[in-house]
Amino acid sequence: MRNLFIAASFLLASSSAFAACSVDVDGNDAMQFNVKAIEIPSTCKDFTVNLTHSGKMPKAAMGHNWVLTKTADMQGVANDGATAGLAKEYVKADDARVIAHTKVIGAGETTSVTFPVSKLAADGKYSFFCSFPGHWALMKGTVTIK
Ligand code: CO
C-alpha cells in the first residue's frame, strides 16, 4: 500500500513537469479577474481558457467574457465591442484583431475557448480582457508565450 502511494505521488509529480495547456480564470461581482498574467507554454499546440463567474449578478449587469488581442488593439476592440452589444457578446462581428474570445457569462455560468498557440508570436505583446462596457479598465492582464 505504501509503495502504491509513493508510485502515485511520483506520477503526480512527474505529470506536473509537463506544461498545462489550459488556465482557469474567474470573474466576480467586483469587476475583477483572479488572474493577471497568463503564460502559454510554447510546447502547447492549442491552449484553452476556462472562464467562470463566481459572483451573484446576471450577465446583463455584470457580464464577463475573455477576449485576447494584441495589447495595442485592446482599447479599440473594447470600444467596438461595447457598441456591438450583449447580443454579439460585446465583440464586433468578424473583428480580425480578436485572436480568441468566449461568450459573455453571468453568475454561476461557465464557458471556455480553445485557440491554436500558433496564432501568437513568441515575442508579441498580448492582453486579455473583458469587453463588457467599462470592464476592460480593470479586467485585464497579459498573455505571453514562454
Ligand atoms: Co466583465
Image (spheres, grey):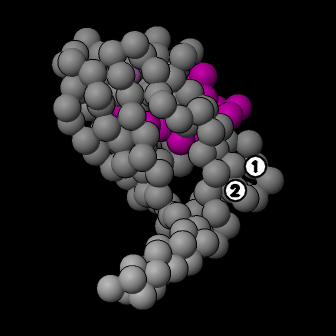
Give above or below for 81 relative to 97.
Answer: above
Q: Secondary structure at mark 2?
A: strand
Q: Which residues are magenta?
A: 65-76
Residue 131 at what x, y percent from top left? 44, 25
**Residue 92 in view here:** no
**Residue 136 in view here:** yes
Q: Which residue is mark 2?
A: 145
Label 1 crowding class (10 Å Cα cut-off): few <14, some 14-19, many 20+? few
Question: Which of these two is toward me, 10 or 127?
Answer: 10
Q: Could you tell me how far apart the alpha carbons at marks 2 and 1 are, in whole angstroms?
A: 8 Å
Q: Residue at x 42, y 16 (%)?
A: 31
Question: Which of these two is toward me, 34 or 76?
Answer: 34
Q: Secondary structure at mark 1?
A: loop
Give above or below for 111 relative to 60.
Answer: below
Q: Is residue 41 left or right of residue 105?
A: right
Disc 2 to disc 1: CB gap under 8 Å: yes
Q: Residue 7 in magenta? A: no
Foreground: disc 2 or disc 1? 2
Q: Quadrant of the C terminus?
A: bottom right
The quadrant holding residue 3 is: bottom left
Q: Amino acid at mark 2?
A: Ile
Q: Quadrant of the N terminus?
A: bottom left
Q: Residue at x 43, y 40 (%)?
A: 25
Q: Which residue is mark 1?
A: 124
Q: Amino acid at mark 1?
A: Gly
